[in-house]
Image: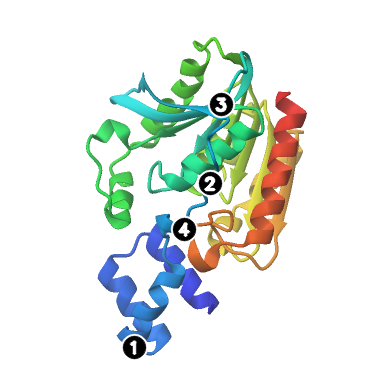
């Protein structure tokens, strides 16, 4: 896949561009609108491609807790028969909670954790199904409210009898940035994993108490431009961290619904590292 096309799609989903402008520029790159339409399914996120991790040995529920701007809804998964578990908060991308992130929550649950995947859009009421409209909803969110709503997920977890008080988190894209910010703002967080997420302000890095694992795609120039400053601050403040850059892979390489950006080898390796990291700091 032409990297210019991948970069254009990344710009479309994160700047964001309007759909007409995106399609117009895609047509220029591909040689015409017919070619653009033929290549679109190869790059767009497609929920139908989501892996389905069986839940036969898991307990699944949907819960709610009070956010700062309304009721938060969350998907919860945990191994059957376990009474006290470390908890992992799974944080979605900039389209809200979907089948892919629910599957990631089940994967973490199968590794022995109480997992919770909140939907930051749930206080906004009935949500559209269209990804463009879902991303537009994100433009209405206030950063501090979103942060507090995820912090409250840990408050909720602390009330559960099946939680042992050991907390971790893993986030992707928008959720990767949130994972970094939770590391800054949740003192009792033990382990935070950020996949291709924007970095927090360097001046706030000294507040981090948790161990960090950071995953980046080597071709993801938009997010990677913040790595040097972040890593320098982590070193200066003696923060316990591991940083991996997966060469020749793109933003969203872990997302199996992400078309040409998905990279199976990098996704598998990074997830093995993530589970090993959680085992080290949460078990």
Vertically, is 192 above or below 80?
A: below
Vertically, is 219 above or below 100?
A: below
Which of the two labelled residues, at mark 3 and mark 1, occupies the earlier sequence position? 1
Disc 4 is placed on an element classified as helix
Rendering coords of residue 249 (x, y %): 63, 65
Vertically, is 219 above or below 213?
A: below
Disc 4 to disc 1, how far (Cα)?
27 Å
Residue 161 vs residue 4, the one in the foreground: 161
Rendering coords of residue 274 (x, y %): 69, 41
Mark 3, Cα crowd under 10 Å, few <14 / some 14-19 / many 20+, is many
Q: Nearer the viewer, mark 4 or mark 2?
A: 4
Residue 36 vs residue 215, the one in the foreground: 36
Disc 4 to disc 2, how far (Cα)?
17 Å
Disc 3 to disc 4, how far (Cα)?
24 Å
Q: Is residue 232 visible?
A: no
Rendering coords of residue 188 (x, y %): 62, 19
Rendering coords of residue 25 (x, y %): 35, 78
Which of the two labelled residues, at mark 4 and mark 1, occupies the earlier sequence position? 1
Which of the two labelled residues, at mark 1 and mark 2, occupies the earlier sequence position? 1
Residue 82 vs residue 189, the one in the foreground: 82
- Taking the spot 43% from the left edge, 45% from the top edge, the residue there is 99
Question: What residue sits right under mark 1 in the picture?
Answer: 32
Residue contact at pointers 3 and 2, CB within 8 angstroms: no
Question: What residue sits right under mark 3 in the picture?
Answer: 78
- Taking the spot 76% from the left edge, 40% from the top edge, the residue there is 235
Q: Nearer the viewer, mark 3 or mark 2?
A: 3
Image quadrant of residue 122? top left
Question: What residue sits right under mark 2 in the picture?
Answer: 172
Residue 49 is labelled as 4
Which of the two labelled residues, at mark 3 and mark 4, occupies the earlier sequence position? 4
């Amino acid at each position: 896949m032409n990297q210019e096309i991948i970069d254009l799609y990344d710009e479309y989903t994160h700047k964001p561009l309007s759909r007409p402008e995106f399609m117009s520029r895609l047509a220029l790159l591909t040689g015409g609108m017919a070619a653009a339409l033929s290549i679109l399914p190869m790059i767009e996120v497609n929920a139908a491609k989501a892996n389905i991790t069986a839940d036969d040995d898991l307990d699944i529920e949907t819960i709610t807790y009070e956010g700062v701007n309304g009721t938060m809804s969350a998907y919860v998964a945990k191994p059957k028969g376990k009474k006290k578990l470390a908890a992992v908060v799974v944080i979605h991308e900039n389209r809200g909670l979907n089948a892919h992130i629910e599957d990631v929550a089940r994967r973490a649950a199968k590794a022995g954790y109480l997992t919770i995947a909140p939907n930051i859009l749930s206080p906004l009421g009935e949500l559209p199904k269209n990804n463009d409209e879902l991303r537009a909803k994100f433009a209405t969110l206030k950063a501090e409210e979103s942060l507090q709503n995820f912090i409250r997920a840990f408050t909720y977890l602390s009330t559960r009898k099946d939680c042992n008080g050991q907390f971790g988190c893993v986030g992707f894209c928008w959720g990767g940035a949130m994972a970094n910010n939770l590391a800054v703002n949740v003192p009792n967080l033990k382990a935070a994993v950020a996949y291709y997420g924007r970095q927090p302000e360097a001046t706030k890095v000294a507040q981090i108490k948790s161990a960090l694992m950071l995953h980046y795609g080597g071709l993801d120039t938009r997010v990677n431009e913040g790595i040097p400053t972040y890593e320098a601050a982590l070193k200066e403040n003696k923060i316990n961290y591991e940083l991996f850059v997966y060469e020749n892979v793109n933003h969203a390489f872990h997302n199996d619904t992400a078309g040409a950006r998905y990279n199976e080898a990098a996704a598998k390796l990074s997830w093995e590292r993530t589970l090993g990291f959680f085992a080290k700091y949460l078990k």
